[in-house]
Image: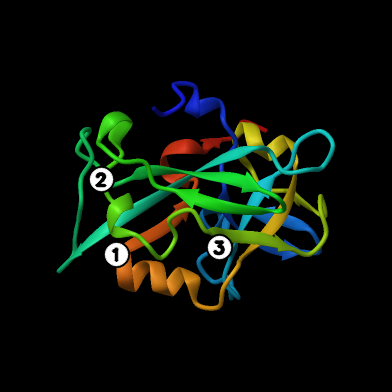
């Protein structure tokens, strides 16, 4: 059963570092900005440590420009990333309750295995853009995959593309 308070859980975010330790959403970058690519980051608790669980949004690609749709008619699904020692492992929940498709049986690649680990210093990063999200008030830690090419393997073998926290639906425009 999925936690009914999932909207209050912290998310894994895909963000871009624009200067030393300052993060923004790729959505905020000017069109002429020469990006070196973003990375996945997680907000940290008040002691600058990992939370026990995070949410991450993803899509399931069917090919030929088509994606699996959830019960609400869009193609964004949620998965858990649970802390296990110092790493996070992804958990794709079976069934379509709360819009989760039944993929976990088809995903031996990541089932109950570490997926993300820490990259760099704890709490070194802070959000500095103009969008609003509850996580943006916290310090962040950068993540990297536990194995080489793990994101590519997930896409090729399971047709899963990790988004992070969808900026088009979860971030609000700031009124600064």
The 10 Å Cα crowd at callout 2, few under 14, some 14 to 19, many 20 or more, is few
How far from the left and from the top, in percent, is residue 29? 57, 60
Tell me which residue sits at (81%, 33%) in the image. 46
Name the residue carrying label 2.
102
Vertical side of 108 occupied by 153: above or below: below
- Answer yes or no: do the residues labelled 3 and 1 have beta carbons within 8 Å? no
On residue 159, the disc is 1
Say which of marks 1 and 2 sits in front: 2
How far apart in space, not on screen, are marks 2 and 3 (Cα)?
38 Å
Vertical side of 136 occupied by 120: above or below: below
Name the residue carrying label 3.
30
The secondary structure type at the circle numbered 3 is loop
Vertical side of 26 occupied by 5: above or below: above
The reply, left or right, for residue 137 in relation to residue 39 is: right
- Answer yes or no: do the residues labelled 2 and 3 have beta carbons within 8 Å? no
How far from the left and from the top, in percent, is residue 167? 48, 46
Q: Quadrant of the N terminus?
A: top left
The secondary structure type at the circle numbered 2 is loop
> Which label's residue is closer to the chain start, 3 or 1?
3
The 10 Å Cα crowd at callout 3, few under 14, some 14 to 19, many 20 or more, is few
Colour scheme used in the picture?
rainbow
The secondary structure type at the circle numbered 1 is loop
How far apart in space, not on screen, are marks 3 and 1 (Cα)?
30 Å
**Residue 147: which quarter of the image?**
bottom right
Tell me which residue sits at (78%, 43%) in the image. 49
How far from the left and from the top, in percent, is residue 54? 57, 41
Tell me which residue sits at (48%, 53%) in the image. 112
On residue 82, the disc is none
How far apart in space, not on screen, are marks 1 and 2 (Cα)?
13 Å
> Which label's residue is closer to the chain start, 2 or 3?
3
The 10 Å Cα crowd at callout 1, few under 14, some 14 to 19, many 20 or more, is some
**Residue 52: which quarter of the image?**
top right
């Amino acid at each position: 059963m999925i936690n009914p308070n999932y909207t209050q859980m912290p998310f894994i975010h895909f963000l871009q570092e624009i200067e030393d330790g300052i993060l923004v959403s790729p959505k905020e970058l000017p069109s002429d900005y020469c990006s070196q690519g973003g990375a996945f980051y997680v907000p940290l608790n008040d002691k600058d440590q990992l939370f026990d669980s995070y949410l991450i949004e993803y899509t399931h690609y069917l090919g030929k420009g088509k994606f699996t749709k959830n019960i609400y008619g869009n193609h964004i699904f949620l998965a858990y990333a649970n802390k296990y020692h110092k790493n996070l492992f992804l958990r794709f929940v079976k069934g379509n309750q709360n819009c989760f498709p039944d993929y976990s049986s088809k995903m031996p690649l990541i089932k109950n295995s570490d997926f993300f680990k820490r990259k760099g210093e704890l709490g070194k990063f802070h959000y500095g853009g103009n969008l609003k999200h509850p996580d943006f008030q916290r310090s962040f830690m950068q993540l990297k995959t536990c194995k080489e090419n793990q994101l590519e393997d997930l896409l090729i073998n399971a047709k899963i593309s990790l988004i992070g926290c969808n900026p088009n639906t979860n971030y609000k425009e700031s009124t600064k």
